[in-house]
Image: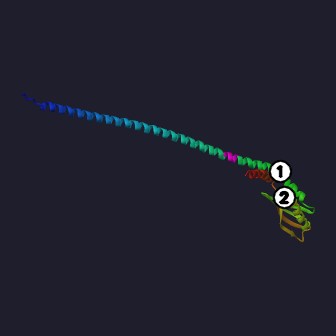
Amino acid sequence: MPQINLLPWREEQRKERKLAFLAALGGGTLAAMLATFIVYLMFSSLINGQQERNETLKAEIATLDKQIEEINNLEAQKQRFISRMEIIEKLQRSRPEIVHVFDEVVRTLPDGTFLTGVKQTDRRLKIDGVAQSSTRVSTFMRNIDKSAWLRNPELAVIETKKDQALGSTFTLFANQVSVAGEEEAAANKPRANRQGAKK
């Protein structure tokens, strides 16, 4: 019976399998490296895109902050203009008041009394004068109390000197009535009443 030596054939087959395994291992490693590189590129592209979007958002936010600051400045300027307009309107309404006040001082001044000085600080009037008697000063104060433009007379000093032929010197204070303030109060009162009625 003939004898066949299979060792060289098996050795050849083993070498081929080894080469195929090494080739498959190299191919798998290469494929894994290629896949890793592709994934890295994808993530890198996504990160770069997100960073660009973040930068765009930061620029937009900075622009909006500037616009908000400008709007706030405009609001502050608007409030200042409104305050100035209100002051101007109040001054325009109160401009004729001083004329009425001096006219009222003359009207309330009784006979036998004359003034030596009038000084105004805000709504407070200081009136200096000379009267023939203290009753004339009392009449002057009563007239002030009934006046539409003067209120709350307060006698500070009344002095009678022996060498003074004209009578007694006096100093009294009175408050000026602001018609503009009363108009504002009257205008605001119905509004407050309406709000109370709504509640």
Q: Main secondary structure of the magenta part?
A: helix
Identity of the residue drawn at 86% across and 66% down: 170
Callout 2 touching callout 1 (CB < 8 Å): no
Question: In the image, what residue type sits under mark 1?
Answer: Pro
Q: Which residue is mark 2?
A: 150
Figure quadrant of residue 168: bottom right
Identity of the residue drawn at 69% across and 47% down: 80
Tell me the quarter of the image containing the N terminus: top left
Density class for disc 2 (Cα within 10 Å; few <14, some 14-19, many ≥20) is: many
Q: Any mark on residue 96, and which? A: 1
Q: Residue furthest top?
A: 2
Residue 48 percent location from the top left of the image? 44, 38
Density class for disc 1 (Cα within 10 Å; few <14, some 14-19, many ≥20) is: few
Residue 101 percent location from the top left of the image? 85, 55
Q: How many marks?
A: 2
Residue 136 percent location from the top left of the image? 91, 65
Q: Residue furthest right?
A: 111
Q: Residue furthest left?
A: 1
Instruction: Please tell me whether mark 2 sits on a helix, a strand or a loop.
Output: strand
Residue 163 percent location from the top left of the image? 90, 70
Question: In the image, what residue type sits under mark 2?
Answer: Leu
Give, as a single range, the part of the protein colored magenta.
77-81
Q: Nearer the viewer, residue 194 or 118?
A: 194
Q: In terms of sequence position, does the residue under pointer 2 or pointer 1 come before the other? A: 1
State left or right for residue 24 relative to residue 128: left
Q: Nearer the viewer, residue 29 or 13?
A: 13
